Image (cartoon, coloured by chain):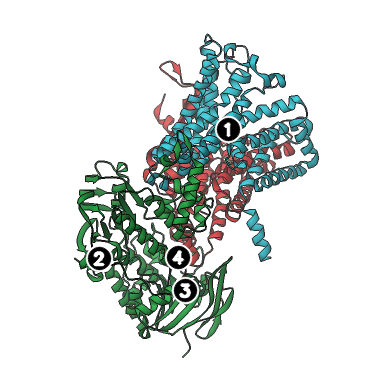
Chain colours: A green, B red, C cyan
Amino acid sequence: MTAAVEFKGISKYFGEVRANSDISFSVARGSIHAIVGENGAGKSTAMKILFGMYRPDAGEILLNGQPVEFSSPIDAMAAKVGMVHQHFMLAEPYTALDNILLQQKGSAFALLPRKEQAQRINDIADRYGFHVDLNAKVEDLSVGEQQRIEILKILSQDSDILILDEPTAVLTPQEVQDLFINLRKLKSEGKTILIITHKLKEVMALSDAVTVFRAGRMVESKQTRDTSIEDLAALMVGRRMQMPEERVSTIDESKTLLSIENLSADLGTHKLRNINLNIKSREIVGVAGVEGNGQDVLIRCLLDPKSLSKNSMTGNIQRQGSLQAFPEDRLRFGVLPSRPVYENFLLGQEHRFTKGLFLKTRELIARTREIMKTYDIRPHDEHLALGKLSGGNQQKLVVARALTQKPDIILAAQPTRGVDIGAIEFIHNEIRKSRDEGAGVLLISSELDELMALSDRIVVLYKGQLVAEFKRSDFNETSLGKAMGGGH
Amino acid sequence: METMPWILALTLATLRLATPLIFASMGGLMSERSGVVNVALEGFMLMGAFAGAVVGYSYASAWAGWCAALIAGLAIGALYAFFVIELKADQIITGMAFNLLVMGLIPFITKILYSSTGSTPALLVEDRFTFEPLLLAIALVAAISFWMYRTRSGLWVLFAGEHPEALTASGVSVRKVRWAAVTLSGGFAAFGGASLSLFLASSYSPLMTGGRGFMALAALIFGKWKPVPALAACILFAFADAIQIRLQGVKIGGIEIPVQFVQILPYIVTIIALAGFIGKSRAPKALGHQ
Amino acid sequence: MKRIFGFLLGLTLALLLTLFAGENPWNVFTILVRSAFGSMYDLGLTLSYTTPLIFCGLSVAIGFHAGLFNIGAEGQMTMAVVTAAAVGVLFPQVPFPLAPILAVLAALAAGGLWGWIAGWLRAERGSHEVIITIMMNFIAAGLAGWFALKIIPNPESQNPETALISPNYMFKDYDLIARLFPDTPANASLIFAIVIAVLMWIFLWKTAWGFKLRAVGANPEAAHRSGISEKKVQIAAMTLAGALAGFVALSEVVGSAGQYRIGFSPDYGFIGIAVALMASNNPLGIIVSAFLMGALHKGASDLDLETSTITRDFSRIIQALVILGVVAQGYWEWFKHKRRKG
């Protein structure tokens, strides 16, 4: 039987950077095929080539044994290949239906066939189980529902090959279960599914075959049943992963650094209700939760209570000592991308580098150079615009800036988002070091692995409330996941 | 003073004065809804006013001038599109430069054509428009609000301004959509200018737009980037303008209000509108992004 | 380097346009140069344009550094100039060294207030500063016109201008530059403008406040998170911008004319945009680019006399094309792209 998709010696360069190099593997028709790899391993690039978003510099792609050459996603869609992007391609102020209709061809000045298409799309949704209110505006729908719109977009085009880029990153565990059920249904209808992920448990649970990418190369492609999580992890990283640290708690119970009492706040879209939380010295408290359950409100209450009026925030926040934060969205809240590294290092600690009215620029540059060495921020050039650094190096600078100020309390929000594995380990170790030196850490993350690796206890934020609390000894993914989905 | 005729006159004056604003704000709507900031409306209007007056005069026909304004507007709109879409030049700075360019080009051309840098020769009163541009303006608003929300290409423009990646992913070229929208923006704004020189007046006089391009933009923002509310905002600003004209020389309690105070009324109303109500107005998400 | 190319490209295109008017571009260019630098008198006029352009360029630049587009320099300047004239006309007894200082401080306050209004509306009400400052320009013109013509008109002239300020307010007797360029409005405020530009350079690049202002311009949300009040910075930047534009009162009223003349400005505020852009908002570069734009403006003013078809409005075309030449640097990539394709 010919494969539904075959990559044959695909290479792709962006300038000097080799994103894909000599990629070859094939995907059987009617199967679920996982593509795994670290950030930057080239898996997204390969899928974007398949979807016609990039043109390969070498090699070819075969669909059902026929070589194809896509110059744009339009060609790919005409060949019945569809893709759900990690960042949804949905315009929020418009309805689900309009977002789906955008995909369809037709004369520019023809009226939109809203009624007939709504009927047809509802039929498709019924058949595969992707229900969604077509007349609702996207901004009023949950992330899971938005993902269904994306999948309906593809199904409404009768596509046979579906590419899903990190589809579970934003979903609750329950939503993930539903998605998997529906994906299996699609498979049984004969569709071929490629799914990009870095969650190996999901690979084992869902896929028939798996291809591993590392540093732009395809390192392994085999049947899922012939492999294991440990195997895949080793292939991804190129070495065995470290086991999370075993540590005896050394929490300094006598020293409360941060205490939050009866905190309620309302930011319109997101709310917090009656939060109580204490953080002691040498303690890391994790806040788990799917994004949009009040994390942003909590961060704002801690960092910028002045911007909230008396009416919209009640309760008490008491702090013993200084506080530093890693912002949840680095590029938006953390850095000045167009400015050099040393000015980014300066941001927020201007008083440390001023004498009278003037900046001590020489001292600042020397200190930045030193920090870039100790934190291994590459390239070692403090005059480079920060935006030119990779995500991991940018984040290291943000972490370095906060931690070198020796804060008593650290608010670490999504500290390793969009960061490669090497930098993740580094950042985790820095957080642990600060903790051992006496800091208290509030860790807000949507990565369960990260929370379980670092936290002494984990509280779960759901719809603005703390709905569950787990001690380190009780950590387990199932119950945490359940609490995150509101089922506690 | 008899009230009824006075109110009627004021209403008519408001509608007449609203016409250039409506056209220009629909021009702004096309461009900004597709994601391109347009502070060049002022220049586009001047271009339309000038081209309309010149051609209208030489053919003794307002309609000829109207068509010329359209062509001139489309041309300068396309040139603006080239700069901001192809060359990715900063949209606000480019827009201001276009205003400056038109202000310099028009006297340059009048000097060649008429050996003067002042006004163009006037149309005969019976040759100029009596009401037509007003009706066309209202028809344009109706057409745009129908087209934008109900047809496929309308959806393209909306998505180009809100989520251009989604539009690209569905196989439509954001570039082409913006090109079309920005070019049309020039045409519509030029109609606004032509209604100044062929409807409210009968010739082009230097800088006759007097900031109306910016008021139209303010009306668009005030109207939340939607056709009908923008129309309402235009009428509000035009009302301030109509009052302004009527207040000149009026005495209150025996003291004449200085003409300069009265003339700045529309500008003050514009600032108040932008300052007071914009709070919840939400710009197209991709507006101004390259 | 690319900016200089952009400037030359804009200038060349503008000169080529004169072909349509039946002129010889090279001829027009030589007129521009001769008229800008041909004699001490010409150079004096060029320098007298340079001074307000430095102030307005700095005004636009400080806005850009804070992420704001100040198109309001024209109005801020107008308010300042009419205020300085008002002080000089209404308080003629103030003795010499105090008088000019008082007039300039009043002018800075008026310009600063005009900028503050726009900054406050932007920071606290989210109003688009471009439209607000444009509207403020019209309002300033109206108010200044009223004040000049109705409250302190010049009784000895039919021209639209205020009465002359008391001689106590002028520093002509001590002005070496004015002596160097007799019969021109060039005056010692040029030195002052250069000093202000240097001070602004130090402020922006060497002080913590300057860094905070630039941080807000680079990423207001990140600045906010780091503890900088971006609203205060935006308001302060616009107020400073207004005050910088207000310094024009020094060169125009106290330094040369001794009065506010309606229409004295050939749109200094707008030319200031081109000045700031050409210098990448670098205060030291602004000194140079203001001189270049001042020379162009002076050069163009003689086109009326020296050619049959080109008028002084031609300087607007040059300015616009120079701005476009500088701002549309995308043509480098665009041409490269085209060549690769073709």
Mark whose residue sits in front, 1 or 4: 1
On the same chain: label 1 and label 4? Answer: no
Structural crowding at the residue carrying mark 2, measured as other residues with C-alpha within 10 Å and reported as few (<14), some (14–19) or many (≥20) = many
CA distance separating discs 1 and 2: 59 Å
CA distance separating discs 3 and 2: 33 Å
Residue C301 locus on image (x, y percent): 71, 31
- Report in which chain the residue with disc 1 lies: C
* Residue named by callout 3: A214
B191 versus A220 height, above or below: above
Amino acid type at mark 1 = Ala
Mark whose residue sits in front, 2 or 4: 2
Amino acid type at mark 4 = Leu
Amino acid type at mark 2 = Gly
Mark whose residue sits in front, 3 or 2: 3
The answer to which of marks 4 and 3 sits earlier in the sequence is 4
Amino acid type at mark 3 = Arg
Q: Residue at x 51, y 16 (%)?
A: C87
- Marks 4 and 3: CB-CB under 8 Å? no
* Residue named by callout 1: C197
The answer to which of marks 3 and 2 sits earlier in the sequence is 3
Mark whose residue sits in front, 1 or 2: 1
* Residue named by callout 2: A485
